């Protein structure tokens, strides 16, 4: 059975999309079949996934495949009880084998209203709202089952809105990407109670589904681990003091808030006293270069550095070597995240 | 104890106070006898599955299992026809929701919803089925087939029990006609009550079981 996973933090700018994409490519390299589901109306994952194909640089070019909004619209409109996932066209990566995309859609932002209403009304006898409430989970699991995906990696926006809530509850587990700063610390304090409230409400709704013969879903994602992002160092390996300070505070708050009884449950393999499973350094120019070509951060070729250099020349020798080292380090950290997958 | 889910039908006996007053004025118990005769249609119900309570102008029936829902609708159909046979229109609603009953306490979202359908949606003598029940049978798994049962019909987005069958159409027509004829005096200048008869006659006429040559029993509009 495929596992549905997300990177989630309601604080933005913590590399959710980039890390998710790189994790997916890494897992595909390991032989797993991956579906990226772009559940963020910002569509950054779709942009990244398609960046390797120059055909889609034209803004007027119609994108291939079925968008997540197009797929769910018949349910939102009450035209279908459940989504017929056999009609959904996924996009195969032109670059990476075994990776496919369920593409995003700017119009998916309209789903905030549909899913928000379902969230409020699913507990009543309103069958339409109950069916809408369970639709995304069954859609993703249906795709996973019939098309043989090992993992479905969902990208979500940095919010606590109804789209994000629906996606997070559909997941088996989530990673928490963090930047060691004040606002991520505040986000950690908030997230535990927010997700706990979602799970509690979900349990109430679930009790009302069985009498109406509507298939339920677990709705109890676990924390698979925290990932420190954008970590800046002074010298070769020594971290900046401010980062160390915030990392320590966040560690304490993950245990006290996020993983408290009023928070989210940790994965069985996660040590609550040391929830960091990976530490990703600031990657400097690697990130925009990789994004420009739609490649994994650990898969940049020398020729791609033309775009990073001011002269348009490829990097060689001592200039290129740090890139190779950083890619290696990055891949190692992504590998650690992959090891924490259920 | 937590409430469980069940189907509840709330039926309102139309003209209840009128009939009661007529008994009071005449010193007879005609209406009581008619009520008893109509409710006799429920005498053989399986009480392990169906519940029945009749208080004043209200009859409440419940059904606790999905698999017996078609049977429940058949029961309501029989009850509607039985009341009509006694010269009484009923109007109702059916809902599926939480319900709890213990001794003197009845806590029921199902009855509340059924009442809402009866009082705000039904409009004329018919038993409205909550659209969520229809949706549940369209999308839920492991439920009995009702779509092809001919038990539910729809008009203008309102689902209601089709009490007419090929075998009872003529009987229902005759009863409705008799009721209308007997009520002519009391309906005079009472447009809301008159409207119920018109809508019911229209229902008879629009039925797929109606004979090609339909003879209306309600007169048309006259010139003055």
Image: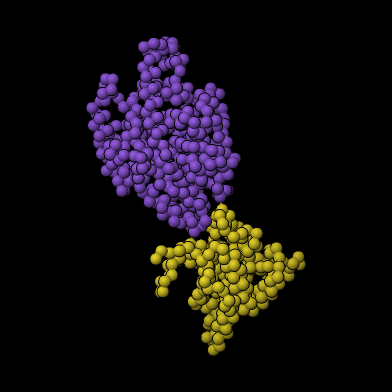
Chain colours: A purple, B yellow
- Residue beneath the point at 28% across and 20% down: A236
Q: Is residue A155 left or right of residue A269?
A: right
Q: Is residue B4 above or below residue B55?
A: above
For the residue pair B202 and A33, the one nearer the viewer reads as A33
For the view shown, which residue lies furthest in the bottom direction?
B27
Quadrant including the N terminus of chain B: bottom left
Q: Is residue B108 above or below residue A270?
A: below
- Residue B193 point in image, percent of width and height: 58, 71
Q: Residue at x 45, y 22 (%)?
A: A299
When the figure is inspected, residue A1 is found, relative to residue A327, above or below; the finding is below
**Residue drawn 56% across and 88% down?**
B28
Q: Give the image location of residue A292, x and y in percent.
A: 46, 22
Q: Is residue B153 visible?
A: yes
The x and y percentages for residue B200 are: 64, 68
Q: Reply above or below: A202 against B218.
A: above
Total number of numbered discs in the rendering: 0
Whether residue A291 is visible to the viewer of this picture, yes or no, is no
Name which residue lies at 55% across and 55% down: B140
Q: Quadrant of the C terminus of chain B?
A: bottom right
Where's residue A56, x and y in %? Answer: 54, 25
């Amino acid at each position: 059975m495929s596992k549905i996973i997300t990177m989630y933090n309601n604080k933005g700018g913590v590399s959710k999309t980039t890390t998710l994409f790189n994790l997916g490519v890494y897992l595909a390299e390991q032989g797993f079949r991956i579906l990226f589901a772009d559940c963020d109306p910002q569509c950054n994952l779709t942009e990244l996934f398609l960046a390797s194909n120059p055909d889609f640089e034209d803004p007027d070019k119609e994108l291939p495949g079925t968008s997540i909004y197009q797929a769910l619209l018949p349910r939102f409109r009450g035209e279908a009880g459940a989504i017929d996932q056999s009609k959904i066209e996924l996009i195969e990566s032109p670059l990476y084998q075994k990776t496919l995309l369920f593409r995003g859609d700017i119009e998916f932002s309209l789903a905030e209203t549909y899913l928000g209403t379902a969230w409020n009304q699913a507990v009543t006898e309103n069958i339409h709202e109950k069916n809408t409430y369970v639709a995304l989970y069954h859609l993703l699991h249906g795709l996973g089952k019939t098309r043989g995906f090992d993992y479905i990696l969902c990208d979500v926006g940095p919010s606590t809105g109804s789209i994000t809530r629906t996606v997070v509850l559909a997941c088996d587990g989530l990673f928490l990407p963090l930047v060691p700063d004040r606002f991520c610390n505040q986000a950690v304090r908030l997230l535990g109670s927010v997700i706990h409230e979602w799970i509690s409400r979900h349990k109430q709704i679930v009790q009302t589904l069985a009498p109406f013969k509507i298939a339920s879903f677990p709705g109890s994602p676990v924390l698979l681990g925290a990932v420190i992002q954008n970590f800046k160092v002074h010298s070769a390996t020594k971290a900046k003091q401010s980062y160390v300070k915030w990392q320590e505070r966040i560690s304490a708050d993950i245990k006290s808030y996020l993983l408290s009884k009023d928070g989210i449950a940790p994965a069985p393999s996660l040590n609550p006293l040391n929830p960091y499973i990976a530490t990703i350094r600031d990657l400097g120019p690697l990130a925009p270069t990789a994004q420009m070509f739609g490649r994994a951060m650990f898969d940049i070729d020398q020729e791609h550095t033309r775009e990073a250099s001011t002269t348009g020349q490829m990097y060689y020798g001592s200039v290129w070597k740090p890139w190779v080292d950083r890619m290696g380090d990055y891949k190692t950290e992504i590998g650690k995240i992959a090891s924490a997958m259920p | 104890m937590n409430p469980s889910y069940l189907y509840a039908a709330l039926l309102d006996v139309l003209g209840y106070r009128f009939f009661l007053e007529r008994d009071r004025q005449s010193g007879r118990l005609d209406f009581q006898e008619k009520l008893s005769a109509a409710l006799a249609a429920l005498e053989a119900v399986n009480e392990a599955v169906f519940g029945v309570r009749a208080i004043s102008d209200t009859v409440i029936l419940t059904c606790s299992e999905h698999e017996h829902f078609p049977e429940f609708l058949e029961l309501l159909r029989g009850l509607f026809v039985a009341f009509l046979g006694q010269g009484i229109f009923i109007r109702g609603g059916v809902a599926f929701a939480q319900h709890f009953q213990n001794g003197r306490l009845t806590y029921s979202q199902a009855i509340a919803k059924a009442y809402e359908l009866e009082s705000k949606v039904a409009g004329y003598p018919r038993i409205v089925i909550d659209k969520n029940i229809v949706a549940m049978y369209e999308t839920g798994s492991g439920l009995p087939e009702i779509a092809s049962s001919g038990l539910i019909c729809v008009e203008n987005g309102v689902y209601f029990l089709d009490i007419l069958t090929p075998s009872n159409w003529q009987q229902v027509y005759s009863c409705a006609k008799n009721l209308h004829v007997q009520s002519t005096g009391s309906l005079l200048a009472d447009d809301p009550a008159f409207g119920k008869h018109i809508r019911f006659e229209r229902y008879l006429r629009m039925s797929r079981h109606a004979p090609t040559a339909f003879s209306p029993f309600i007169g048309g509009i006259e010139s003055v």
